[in-house]
Amino acid sequence: MSKLSKAFRSFAEATARYSGKPAAFLIAAGIVIVWAATGPLFGFGDTWQLVINTGTTIITFLMVFLIQNTQNRDSAALQIKLDELIRTSRSRNALLDVDNLDEDSLERIREMYRKLAHKKEEEARRSRGAGRRVRREDELEEACEEVKEIDRELARASADHPDPGGGPEQKD
């Protein structure tokens, strides 16, 4: 990593960290109060208004890039950690590349998981209400069918959107 990249990273992290603190808000509020208080001195003129408009525009413009840089790095680190947890657990490795899918595919998969969760809640409610337990074999069979449906959706979406980078290696 170059010195410039390291310096930018350090600056972006510090800016994101300190801009979210109460002191930063109080400083910004103080600047606005001082600006508003000077209005009568400058006759609430165009230049007086231009100062706050220009200042806030420049700060907002620069902050977008600094905060986005920090969020991109945090998101990438979190994704790597989640991928490693999926890869090393008994979870399905097909979900490792789910972040490469388009919005429609993600929404269909999300909806399948919502339905699966709703079914499980209903089964638990029925089993408590009837005073009996849902048979584990039926539960597993039903869950397997749901998982197969999600796998089919993942395969269909992956075929529609091949990963040009090849993606991480998956274990079976």
Image (cartoon, rainbow, N blue to C red):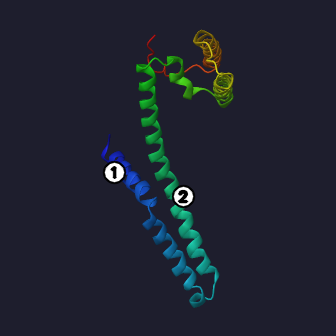
For the residue pair 8 and 130, the one nearer the viewer reads as 130
For the residue pair 140 and 96, the one nearer the viewer reads as 140
* Image point (43%, 13%), residue name: 171
Of pointers 2 and 1, the one earlier in the residue sequence: 1
Question: What's the amino acid at mark 1?
Answer: Ala
- Give percent across and percent down for residue 91: 49, 19
Callout 2: SS? helix
Direction left: furthest residue? 3
For the residue pair 124 and 114, the one nearer the viewer reads as 124
Q: Which residue is mark 1?
A: 7
- Give percent across and percent down for residue 68: 50, 48
Question: What's the amino acid at mark 2?
Answer: Phe
The answer to whether 149 is drawn above or below residue 43 in the figure is above
- Give percent across and percent down for residue 8: 38, 50
- Structural crowding at the residue carrying mark 1, measured as other residues with C-alpha within 10 Å and reported as few (<14), some (14–19) or many (≥20): few
- Give percent across and percent down for residue 84: 41, 25
For the residue pair 69 and 148, the one nearer the viewer reads as 148
* Image point (48%, 51%), residue name: 67
**Real-space CA distance between mark 2 and mark 1, rounded to the nearest whole angstrom:** 19 Å
Q: Which residue is mark 2?
A: 61
* Image point (33%, 51%), residue name: 7
Q: Which image quarter: residue 81?
A: top left
Q: Pointers 2 and 1 in contact (CB under 8 A)?
A: no
* Image point (30%, 46%), residue name: 3
- Structural crowding at the residue carrying mark 2, measured as other residues with C-alpha within 10 Å and reported as few (<14), some (14–19) or many (≥20): few
